[in-house]
Image (cartoon, helix red, strand yellow):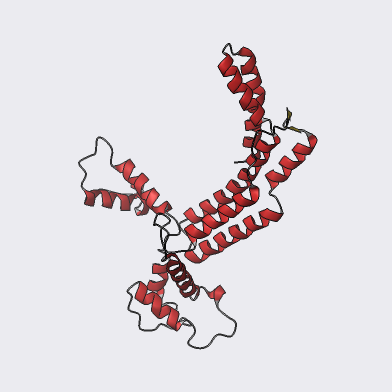
Amino acid sequence: MKKRIVKQILEVSGKISVLIDESNSLGKRAVYRGLSKRCSSPQFLLDLAIMSDILAELSMLSESLQNKETTLIHADKLMRRNNRFFEAMKEKPGTNSLEAKIAIKEGTFSSVPLIYNHKIPTINHQQLITSVINNLRRRMFTTISNHEPCGSSVPLHQETYKSLLNELKVLEPDQWPIDKPASFGEPETEKLCRRFKLRILSKTIQGYQKRLTPLFNCTKLIPCSSAACERGFSLMNLIITPTRMRLTMPHVSSLMFVKPYGSNLRDWYPEP
């Protein structure tokens, strides 16, 4: 949600005043009058601005996590950066919040006069930001689904996530220490091989990257979001149509594989 959307919402109050004059029903006039007072109140503007700042940051995080090239290490960095950004928002408001505060001091926003209404409650911005941070931590930094009931197993899944992250960092050269021993990364590599059921003779990370190629490929398959599943369902809906309901699951699976990974149809020559 950007500044122009906030302006459009506030500009609705000007159109609502026209509806009040044109309406013949007393009930509709009361509804329009209430909407006009809410849209032109400083409380509504501040609440809309803080939500705009939060949603703008979350949208960038969502787009990054949906990228197929995003690894778990990179996703963890992005999520921690977002949490630091939201923590900073408690002390320093975002761009839209600052603009909203300036408009309140001036008394107008986008040529709409702002009128204070004590009946309209204001969102607790500190509590809202804290809730966003807690939800991000609960959903992201664990190996359990957010749909699972919270219980005593939550700390265990969080520790499992930390352990997996530490093992994956061994495969990232930028995460290596300056003074690393000769057997650096061997225990972590062995654990990763057991996770993915791989049998690799040499598990020392230094100088044997080519031998560990199957392990590198497996780590890249760890999904950082549910975007891959959603793409699969969307692709299935495009393939299975009301006129193609008799397709078997093996055929659908093959077509779903060919669609994203197959060659262009123009490159296919049916002649023997």
Name the quarter where the N terminus is drawn.
top right
2 and 84: which one is in front? 84
The outermost residue toward the bottom is 182
Residue at 63 percent across and 22 percent down: it is 33
The outermost residue toward the top is 24
Which image quarter: residue 10?
top right
Residue at 62 percent across and 36 percent down: it is 5
User: Compared to 236, does 181 lie above or below?
Assistant: below
Which image quarter: residue 107?
top right
1 and 131: which one is in front? 131
Residue at 55 percent across and 74 percent down: it is 175
Where residue 176 appears, as percent x and y from the top left, is 55, 78
**Residue 140 in view, yes or no:** yes
**Residue 211 in view, yes or no:** no
User: Compared to 195, does 150 lie above or below?
Assistant: above
Where residue 167 appears, as percent x and y from the top left, is 46, 75
